[in-house]
C-alpha cells in the first residue's frame, strides 16, 4: 500500500506541527516531528497502519507518553511501536523498526524533529540489504543529512 498523502514542501511547513508535517522517505514510510494524540484519527483515515515513536518518555515537558500515544493509536485501529532513541539508535530500536518495515505497510515514524526516526529507518533498511547511497539520497530528499551515519 502506498500513502495517498501529497508531499508537503519543506519550506512551506507551518510552525506548529500538524500531521501533514511529514517527510517522505519511501512509498510506505514518512517521518514527522512530535505528533498530537488528536492526529491519530486523521492518520487512520490516511491509511497509516503503524505509528513508531522514537522519542523516549519524558524527553520534553508536556509531550505525550508512549502509553498515551499507544492508546490513541489503538483506539483508531493503528498499531503502535515504541522504539526510543536517545542519540545513536541501538540494536533494539533498529530491530523493532526493521520488523515494522518488513510488513511493507504505511508507517508514520516520529521523534522531536524526525532526525532520529530517519536514522533508525536507514539503519534498519541497510540491515535489510538497501544500498547506503540510496538511503542517504532518500533522507537528503526529505531534508535529513545522514552523510556521517555509518551505513
Image: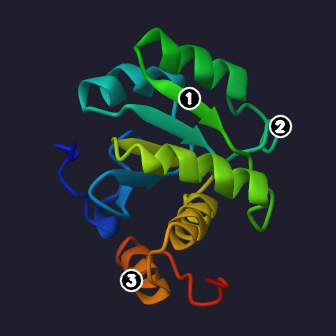
Relative horizontal placement of residue 11, taking residue 66 as reference (left or right): left
Report the front residue among 28 and 44: 28
Q: Which mark is residue 101?
A: none
> What is the CA distance from the residue labelled 2 to the residue labelled 1?
18 Å
- Answer few, some or many: residues within 10 Å of disc 3's Cα (few below 14, many 20 plus, some between 14 and 19): few
Percent coordinates x, y for residue 50 in the rendering: 45, 34
Q: Are marks 3 and 2 in contact (CB under 8 Å)?
A: no
Q: In percent of the image, x 51 and y 44: which residue is there?
A: 100
Q: Please say if 78 is above or below 52.
A: above
Relative horizontal placement of residue 42, taking residue 128 as reference (left or right): left
User: Nearer the N terminus, badge 1 or badge 3?
Assistant: 1
> What is the CA distance from the residue labelled 3 to the residue labelled 2?
34 Å
Relative horizontal placement of residue 118, taking residue 130 as reference (left or right): right
What residue did someone put label 1 on? 80
- The answer to whether residue 17 is visible is no
What kind of element bears circle 3? helix
Report the front residue among 126 and 113: 126
Residue 90: quadrant of the picture: bottom right
Residue 8: quadrant of the picture: bottom left
What residue did someone put label 3 on? 134
Amino acid at each position: 500500500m502506498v500513502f495517498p498523502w501529497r508531499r508537503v514542501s519543506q519550506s512551506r511547513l507551518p510552525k506548529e506541527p500538524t500531521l501533514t508535517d511529514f517527510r517522505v522517505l519511501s512509498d510506505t514510510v514518512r517521518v514527522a516531528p512530535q505528533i498530537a494524540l488528536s492526529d491519530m484519527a486523521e492518520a487512520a483515515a490516511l491509511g497509516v497502519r503503524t505509528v513508531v515513536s522514537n522519542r523516549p518518555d519524558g524527553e520534553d515537558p508536556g509531550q505525550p507518553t508512549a502509553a498515551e500515544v499507544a492508546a490513541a493509536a489503538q483506539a483508531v485501529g493503528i498499531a503502535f511501536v515504541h522504539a526510543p532513541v536517545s542519540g545513536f539508535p541501538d540494536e533494539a530500536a533498529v530491530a523493532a523498526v526493521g520488523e515494522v518495515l518488513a510488513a511493507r505497510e504505511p508507517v508514520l515514524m516520529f521523534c522531536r524533529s524526525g532526525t532520529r526516526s530517519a536514522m533508525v529507518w536507514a539503519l534498519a533498511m541497510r540491515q535489510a540489504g538497501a544500498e547506503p547511497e540510496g538511503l542517504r539520497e532518500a533522507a537528503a530528499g526529505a531534508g535529513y543529512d545522514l552523510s556521517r551515519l555509518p551505513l
